[in-house]
C-alpha cells in the first residue's frame, strides 16, 4: 500500500554504479508484487507456461536480479513472515478490493475494452504460497541469501541496515522509514523505466536514495513523531488514515502537539473516525515489530542444473536466454577477479 510521504521526503538521485560491491537487502514481497501486477499481456492476462502455471514472478525476478548481479550488486532477499494481528482488517479490505476489481474485469471483458481489462486484471493479482516458494528456490539457485523475517519484511530489512550488515534496503514503499531504516533505495531498475500500474504503458524512472537522518532533520521530527505522522495519513494497519488529513495537515498537527500525542489524536478526532482501533496499538506495533538475527549472508556459486530445471524444464523459459544470462554473469565474475588480481601488481 505504501505511505503517502512523497511530498514530504528529501531524496537524491543515485545509480546502479553507486551500489557496486555493496550489500543491499530487498523487501521481496514488494519486489514480487511489482512483477505480478505489471508483467502481463496487453489485455492484462497473466503470463503462464504451457501447463497454465503463472510465470510473471519468475520472469521479473530472474531478469532484474541477474542484471543487478552483472553490475556487482550483492543482493540478499528478505521474505515476510506472519503479519501482525492488527493487519487483518487491511487484508480484508484488500480482498474486498480484489473482488470488486474482478467484477470490473468481467465487465471490461464483455465490452472487449483491453485497456480496462489490463487495469483491473492487475488489481486482482495474488502472490500465492507456491509462487513464494518458487521465488525462494530461484534466488537460492542463483547463489543468493534468502532471509525469513519473523513478521514484516520491511522491518527486517531496516534492522539489517541498522546493524551495518547491509548498505541499504530496496523497496518502493516509504514504510521502511517508520521502521527506522537508515537508507532506502527506490526505483532500482536497470532499464530506467517501469510499467505503470494498471496500464500498458511505461514511465521513465531513476533510482533514488533516501536517508532517514536527513529526512528527520529536514522535517524537524524524531522517529516517534514520524510514526505518528504516518498513522495520521494511513499505514498498512489503518488504511486511509483520518479522512481529510493529508501529509501537510498531519505535519502541522505534530508541530502543534510535538510531545502530547493524546491531545494530537483528540484534536484529529481519531475516536470518531476509528472507534474500534486505538492509535497506540498501531504505534507500538510499528515500534516493536519482531526482527531476527537468525540469518546468514553468504553468496554461493550458481546451481545451473537446478536453475535450468526450474526455469526451462518446468516453466518453458528459453534455454538459450537462460544460458546467455549465466554466461554474462560468469564473464562479470571473471572480470572482477581480474580487477582484484591487478591490484597486487
Image (spheres, helix red, strand yellow):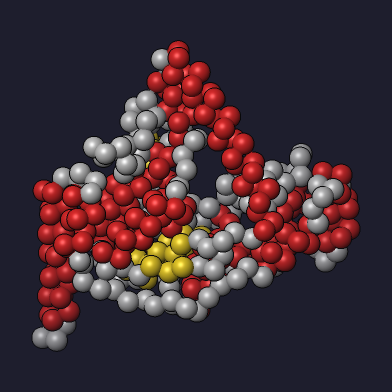
The residue positioned 78% from the left and 57% from the top of the image is: 279
Which image quarter holds the C terminus? bottom left
Q: Is residue 135 left or right of residue 258?
A: left
Q: Is residue 157 left or right of residue 58?
A: right
Q: Is residue 268 left or right of residue 88?
A: right
The residue positioned 89% from the left and 58% from the top of the image is: 263
Nearer to me, 43 or 247: 43
Quarter holding residue 220: bottom right
The residue positioned 83% from the left and 66% from the top of the image is: 259
Quarter holding residue 39: top left
Counting from the top left corner in percent of width and height, residue 57 is at 35, 47
The residue positioned 63% from the left and 68% from the top of the image is: 289
Counting from the top left corner in percent of width and height, residue 46 is at 36, 35
Nearer to me, 93 or 219: 93
Quarter holding residue 43: top left
Q: How many marks?
A: 0
Vertical relation: 15 (above or below) 194: below
Nearer to me, 129 or 279: 129
Vertical relation: 24 (above or below) 128: below
Vertical relation: 186 (above or below) 164: above
Counting from the top left corner in percent of width and height, residue 160 is at 49, 73
Counting from the top left corner in percent of width and height, residue 339 is at 15, 75
Vertical relation: 189 (above or below) 292: above
Q: Is any part of residue 36 visible from this angle? A: yes
Amino acid at each position: 500500500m505504501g505511505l503517502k510521504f512523497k511530498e514530504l521526503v528529501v531524496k537524491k538521485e543515485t545509480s546502479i554504479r553507486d551500489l557496486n560491491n555493496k550489500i543491499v537487502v530487498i523487501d521481496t514481497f514488494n519486489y514480487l508484487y511489482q512483477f505480478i501486477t505489471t508483467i502481463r499481456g496487453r489485455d492484462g492476462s497473466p503470463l503462464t507456461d504451457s501447463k497454465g502455471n503463472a510465470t510473471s514472478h519468475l520472469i521479473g525476478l530472474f531478469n532484474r536480479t541477474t542484471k543487478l548481479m552483472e553490475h556487482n550488486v550483492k543482493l540478499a532477499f528478505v521474505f515476510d513472515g506472519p503479519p501482525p494481528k492488527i493487519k487483518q482488517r487491511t487484508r480484508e479490505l484488500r480482498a474486498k478490493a480484489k473482488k470488486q476489481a474482478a467484477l470490473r474485469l468481467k465487465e471490461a471483458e464483455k465490452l472487449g475494452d483491453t485497456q480496462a481489462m489490463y487495469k483491473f486484471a492487475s488489481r486482482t493479482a495474488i502472490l500465492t504460497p507456491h509462487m513464494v516458494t518458487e521465488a525462494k528456490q530461484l534466488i537460492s539457485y542463483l547463489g543468493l541469501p534468502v532471509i525469513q523475517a519473523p513478521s514484516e519484511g520491511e522491518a527486517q530489512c531496516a534492522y539489517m541496515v541498522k546493524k551495518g550488515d547491509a548498505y541499504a534496503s530496496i523497496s518502493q514503499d516509504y514504510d521502511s522509514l517508520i521502521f527506522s531504516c537508515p537508507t532506502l533505495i527506490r526505483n532500482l531498475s536497470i532499464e530506467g523505466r517501469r510499467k505503470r500500474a494498471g496500464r500498458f504503458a511505461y514511465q521513465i524512472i531513476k533510482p533514488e536514495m533516501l536517508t532517514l537522518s536527513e529526512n528527520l532533520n529536514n522535517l524537524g521530527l524524531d522517529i516517534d513523531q514520524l510514526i505518528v505522522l504516518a498513522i495520521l495519513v494511513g499505514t498498512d494497519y489503518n488504511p486511509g488514515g483520518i479522512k481529510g488529513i493529508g501529509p501537510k495537515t498531519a505535519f502541522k498537527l505534530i508541530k502543534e502537539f510535538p510531545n502530547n500525542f493524546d491531545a494530537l489524536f483528540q484534536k484529529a478526532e481519531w475516536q470518531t473516525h476509528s472507534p474500534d482501533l486505538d492509535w497506540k496499538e498501531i504505534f507500538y506495533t510499528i515500534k516493536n515489530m519482531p526482527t531476527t538475527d537468525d540469518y546468514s549472508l553468504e553468496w554461493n556459486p550458481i546451481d545451473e542444473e537446478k536453475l535450468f530445471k526450474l526455469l526451462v524444464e518446468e516453466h518453458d523459459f528459453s534455454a538459450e536466454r537462460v544460458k546467455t544470462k549465466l554466461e554474462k554473469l560468469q564473464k562479470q565474475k571473471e572480470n572482477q577477479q581480474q580487477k582484484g588480481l591487478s591490484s597486487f601488481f
